Amino acid sequence: MVNNEAVRLIHVFDTTLRDGEQSPGCSMNLTEKIEVARRLERLRVDVLEAGFPASSPGDLESVKAIAALIKDCSVAGLCRALEKDIDAAREALAKAAAPRVHIFLATSPIHMEYKLKMSREQVLERAIMAVQYAKKFCSQVEFSAEDAFRSDPDFVCEVFAAVIGAGATVVNAPDTVGYAIPDEFAAFIRYIKAHTPNMEKARLSVHCHNDLGLACANSLAAISAGADQVECTINGIGERAGNASLEEIVMALQVRKDHFQVETRIDSTQLYTVSRMVSQVTGVKVQPHKAIVGDNAFAHEAGVHQHGVLANRATYEIMTPESVGIPQNRMVLGKHSGRHAFEERLRDLGLSLSEALVEPLFAQFKALADKKKVVSDRDIEALVIELSASVPETWKLDRWVINCGSTLSSTSTIRLKAQDGSVQEQAAVGNGPIDAACKAINRIIGKEPILESYELGAITGGEDAQGETLVKILWKDRHWNGRGVSTDVVESSIKAYLAAMNALEWELSQKPPPAGLTPITGTGGKESKRPLPPAER
């Protein structure tokens, strides 16, 4: 039953591009990060954490590019409690409409003793210094007590009171290792709110990890206990078991508004599109039974369920597919469809594209329609993602020939066109048609990366379905993702491998490879091998 209390606004802090992207296998190039940032802005997140500027020159440049582009939400950069990290964030966020410096420092005994090798007094002093330094140039400063839940609650209160006094506008209490149980995490948040002097002068945030599968439950429990901000990622991506899932938290608060008595600014009709986008650019698929955005989230196979849904959808659906933006076919699109109908479908899907992108996209749609009787919404989404999130094509597939069979070795002939218009052709023999094609591409480009993962699936059902291939390549200890779509699965595989190679070539042309790798620990306590500036190596 809805009561008469005022509805609180919960701020949604998205860290897909930082915490999510630093997890193994989820790396994105700059073009992909910018496109994801645009989708998150359209989703209406309150804060978009764009990266960790001090971790590498590439991260600094990506945060700088996103900060200059995004205008309708705050853009945050993560920092250790070090002046040089804060200086890097200052540079990266210089053009942000609403910049936020996000500082983290561990407060748990195990982290202070073994990682920081600092006493409680030193941690307190360092936290105050960092916030005061950041406050000199940024009005929004967030401080995170890494591993807060495993810390002494009184020490967390002491640190929070001190950093609020130093100018912090948000204090964040993470469950860094996903150790909490919902009722005890709620009690922890209530204790922090009740025992932190001047807590009313700052927003209290939570950042929960999913090691026990409780990240969303803990986040919701914290909101019930008085937390004002929740930190999460699209599809729950993140290191180890991941983070709290943005779409699950948002829809829980929306569907059970009678219980939580809160609201967010999120446009829930954008959730499905953003989820698909993040899945495509990271190469990490959403499992079919994933809540809210999985393929089976609104599917009904059991006869009893089907009968109930046909009579009244509310019998088995507590929300509608439309409420999360799952597209519903309104008209059939095929080779006779015109541009007006095509653009109307783009608007129905929540895909806002510039005129410069619509023209080539429509041409690709017509080419696909010549191969398929009906072009589905998922086909269109795949075309949009392939066009908008791709890197410049150093090499373009010109033509390919594959010969294979049970009684002969697989051979391939691949011809690629370079940016200057010249063409190169190579042939190769391999252990199957895909291996042969990859070897031929390697010969042309002059690099031999390891094909670390290869996934092939269908975008839609039917014999004319488009094949979708996702690959990950490894070269000199660095990873690149590639994606290819075609009605021919061999061609989709070749395009995916070439896309990964183009990402490698393009990134290496922007800056030299890092000379050293040093572990960095983020707000959620996750370590990733990221390049650091020379002074830190």
Image (cartoon, grey):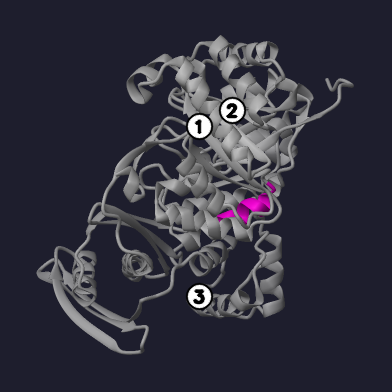
Q: Earlier in the sequence, mark 1 or mark 3?
A: 1
What kind of element bears circle 3? helix
Of the 4 image quadrants, the one containing the C terminus is top left
Q: CA distance from mark 1 to mark 2?
A: 9 Å
Asked if residue 86 is among those painted magenta in the image, a careful observer would answer no
In the image, what residue type sits under mark 3? Leu
Q: Residue 282 appears at what percent x and percent y?
A: 43, 52
Residue under label 3, please give it: 368
Work out which residue is located at the far right of the displayed protein and give it.
4
Q: CA distance from mark 1 to mark 3?
A: 49 Å
Q: CA distance from mark 2 to mark 3?
A: 48 Å
In the image, what residue type sits under mark 2? Asn
Residue under label 1, please give it: 104
Tell me if I can see residue 214 in this picture.
no
Task: Give the main secondary structure, helix, strand or loop, of the magenta stretch.
Answer: helix
In the rendered image, which quarter is residue 117 located in? top left
The image's mark for residue 359 is none
In the rendered image, which quarter is residue 188 located in? top right
Dot 1: within a 10 Å radius of its alpha carbon, few (fewer than 14), some, or many (20 or more) residues? Answer: many
Q: Residue 485 appears at what percent x and percent y?
A: 42, 66
Residue under label 2, please give it: 172
Q: Residue at x 36, y 65 (%)?
A: 511
Tell me if I can see residue 350 in this picture.
yes
Q: Earlier in the sequence, mark 1 or mark 2?
A: 1
Of the 4 image quadrants, the one containing the N terminus is top right
* Front tag of 1 and 3: 1
Q: Nearer the viewer, residue 499 or 327?
A: 499
Picture layout, residue 432 above or below residue 110: below
In the image, what residue type sits under mark 1? Phe
